[in-house]
């Protein structure tokens, strides 16, 4: 009963705080989970003290929750740290101050971005989705770098379009959208999608009664969940579902990460990218400069390899429609005397190549094992290194 009353009091205090509605909901959910754990943890108030009133008991309870979250619940480090931040806010608003609990060390990895081929497939699916509204929802996180909350928070008056350019006024994070920024609409695909939707919007029910740019079928503002579902459904349509390796973590924020990653790796000024993303400083932007898995693979591929007949590659292979890998995903490359090279796939590791087999590698030192005519030249530069024997 005491824990329930403490949560209700915290919710009333939080309602008066200068926070966005999404932040208040997340803090409440995390504190509710901590209090639920506290109710079932079996702590003895006479022996351990009351964690709601005693600072020493508070520190012990928070550290015990952290150990439980890490070992039993196996929560991710970022989830643990976010919950600890909410718990500190809970105790601070009760007048006890923040608990003494060490934060988890976060892995230094770049945010997950969508690969160039996957983003091309996604954009093609968006082009053929058949809905002007859904097209705008799907393109804004990638072509403008908007958060999903910023997408649904747009009003009609926030869009200014002309024949060759335009501007988009975005209300960022914070209560009542206190952080405003203006973005240029230089991508013709996005301008065309917005133009088509603005032409169709007046025909929707109760469109004249709502200032929202994106409407639901009842004439109200489109919700975060509905907009997120539009994007994830389009991703699943092209094989980027949450249950696939390529689509793991795919969603609106992955598209925003892709926007930032492509700009930074394309040589854009970090200060400019931070301004486009709505970041107040460069500290958050530094995460986008961290190496990803592809960078690590390229670095390992620079190691010296055996130039003899026996060769092993740990390289990442890219297979395409005219090559059929076996069930274990392994590949051999065999040379056949024909006008055009034919390669038969059956093993990842190229070991002890028999006579008549062709060894392939990369002329630019990048990790790849691919086939002539299957990999775009702009992605991988491939050449035959050695022909062993005369053929069999």
Image (cartoon, rainbow, N blue to C red):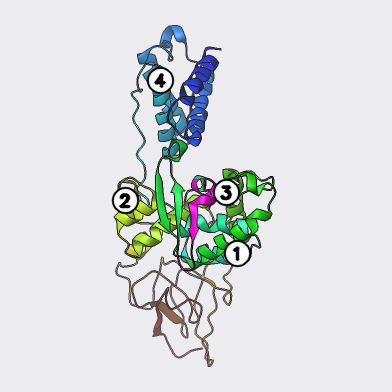
Give residue 31's mark.
none
Label whose residue precedes the other's in the sequence (1 or 4) = 4
**Secondary element type, mark 4:** helix
Question: CA gap, disc 2 to disc 3?
Answer: 26 Å
Label whose residue precedes the other's in the sequence (2 or 3) = 3
Tag 2 near tag 4, CB within 8 Å:
no
Tell me the residue at 65%/54% (across/down). 202
Magenta-colored span = 150-165
**Secondary element type, mark 2:** helix
Please rate how many residues cluster around mark 4, counting C-alpha atoms within 10 Å: few if below 14, some from 14 to 19, many from 20: some
Magenta stretch: residue 389 in it? no
For disc 3, the marked residue is 228
Label whose residue precedes the other's in the sequence (2 or 1) = 1
- The x, y position of residue 153, in whole percent, is 52, 45
Tell me the residue at 48%/81% (across/down). 372
Give residue 125's mark.
1
Left or right placement of residue 273 versus residue 172 in this view: left
Residue 184 visible in the snapshot? yes
- The x, y position of residue 114, in whole percent, is 48, 59
Label whose residue precedes the other's in the sequence (4 or 3) = 4
Front label number (2 vs 4): 4
For disc 4, the marked residue is 93
């Amino acid at each position: 009963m005491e824990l329930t009353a403490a949560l209700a009091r915290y919710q009333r205090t939080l309602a008066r705080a200068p926070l966005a509605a999404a932040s208040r909901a997340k803090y409440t959910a995390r504190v509710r989970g901590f209090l639920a754990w506290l109710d079932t943890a079996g702590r003895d108030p006479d022996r351990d003290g009351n964690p709601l009133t005693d600072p020493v008991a508070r520190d012990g309870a928070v550290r015990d929750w952290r150990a439980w979250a890490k070992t039993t619940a196996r929560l991710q480090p970022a989830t643990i740290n976010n919950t600890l931040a909410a718990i500190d806010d809970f105790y601070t608003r009760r007048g006890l101050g923040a608990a003494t609990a060490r934060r988890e060390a976060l892995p230094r990895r770049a945010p997950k971005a969508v690969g160039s081929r996957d983003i091309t497939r996604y954009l093609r699916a968006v082009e053929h989705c058949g809905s002007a509204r859904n097209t705008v929802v799907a393109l804004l996180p990638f072509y403008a770098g908007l958060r999903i909350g910023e997408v649904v928070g747009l009003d009609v008056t926030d869009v200014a379009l002309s024949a060759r350019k335009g501007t988009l006024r975005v209300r960022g994070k914070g209560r009542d959208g206190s952080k405003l920024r203006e973005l240029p609409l230089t991508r013709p695909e996005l301008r065309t999608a917005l133009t088509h939707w603005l032409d169709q919007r007046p025909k929707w029910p109760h469109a004249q009664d709502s200032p929202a740019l994106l409407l639901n079928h009842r004439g109200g503002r489109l919700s975060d969940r509905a907009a997120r579902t539009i994007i994830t459904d389009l991703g699943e349509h092209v094989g980027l579902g949450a249950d696939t390796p390529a689509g793991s973590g795919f969603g609106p924020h992955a598209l925003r990460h892709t926007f930032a990653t492509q700009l930074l790796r394309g040589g854009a000024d970090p200060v400019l990218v931070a301004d486009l993303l709505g970041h107040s400083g460069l500290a958050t932007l530094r995460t986008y400069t961290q190496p990803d898995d592809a960078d690590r693979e390229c670095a390992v591929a620079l190691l010296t390899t055996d130039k003899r007949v026996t060769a092993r590659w740990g390289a990442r292979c890219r297979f395409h429609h005219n090559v059929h890998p076996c069930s274990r995903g392994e590949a051999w490359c065999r040379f056949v005397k024909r006008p055009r090279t034919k390669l038969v796939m059956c093993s990842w590791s190229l070991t002890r190549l028999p006579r008549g087999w062709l060894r392939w590698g990369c002329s630019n030192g990048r990790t790849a094992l691919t086939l002539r005519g299957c990999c775009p030249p702009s992605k991988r530069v491939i050449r035959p290194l050695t022909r062993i024997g005369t053929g069999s």
